[in-house]
Amino acid sequence: MRVFEGMYLRVLRWAQLPAAPALLAGLSFVEAFAFPVMPEIMLAPMALARPARAFAYAHMSLLFSLLGSLVGYALGHYLFDAMRPLLAHLGWLPMIQHWVDLLQSQAVAHPWSVFGTLVLAGFVPVPMKVFTWASGIVGLPLLPFLTSMAVGRGKRVWLLAWLIRRFGRRAEPLLHRYSERIGWAVLLLILALLLWWWLFR
């Protein structure tokens, strides 16, 4: 069953639609507080289709991720207790509580002491929404929060844009040919990292 090849071709078609920038903006915004799909799944094929605009698309994705992170922060800060049953049902509550405890212990020393943790969180296989909710629950000051979100998410989208600008035209045939293997490999890697995090947190 070739699951990822079909998804790859479908997203490539979406990336060439006139509405693609709006789709990327919407996905980046909602993913920061609710949606489970990373915006890179839309950003990568858009940048491949128009490599000269790769960094413009990365900047757009980052901007709307930051706006969405403010929504996640507000939801965590004002509605956490009311939404606790829903978060438990979705399976997010243990992860959120883990990061709440970690951020609270660090924030006691100084609000900026959590900066490095949130920046590194950009490459951890835990959804961004977990960190935005946890930061709101703890009540981190907005400047350290937004700065860490900008650096953490920015390094991902900027690295992706740079790689595509540098290798995109040559990489696209290989991505097409090996999309199925790459998709399953990434999925297995994420599952392994999540299992490691669950066992050793």
Image (cartoon, rainbow, N blue to C red):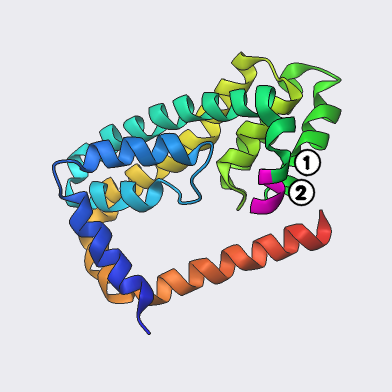
12 left or right, relative to 198:
left
Which quadrant, please, contains the N terminus?
bottom left
Where residue 110 appears, as percent x and y from the top left, is 80, 17
Query: Foreground: 65 or 36?
Result: 36
Do the numbered discs 1 and 2 sit on residues whose CB atoms are within 8 Å?
A: yes
Where residue 155 appears, as percent x and y from the top left, is 48, 37
Tell me if I can see residue 179 in this picture: no
* Range drawn in magenta: 86-91
Q: Which mark is residue 195?
A: none
* Three-letter amino acid code at the position of disc 2: Pro
* Three-letter amino acid code at the position of disc 1: Gln
Where residue 51 appears, as percent x and y from the top left, is 20, 45
Above or below, 155 relative to 189: above
The residue singled out by tag 1 in the image is: 97
Q: Residues within 10 Å of mark 2 (few under 14, many from 20)?
A: few
Above or below, 112 relative to 117: above
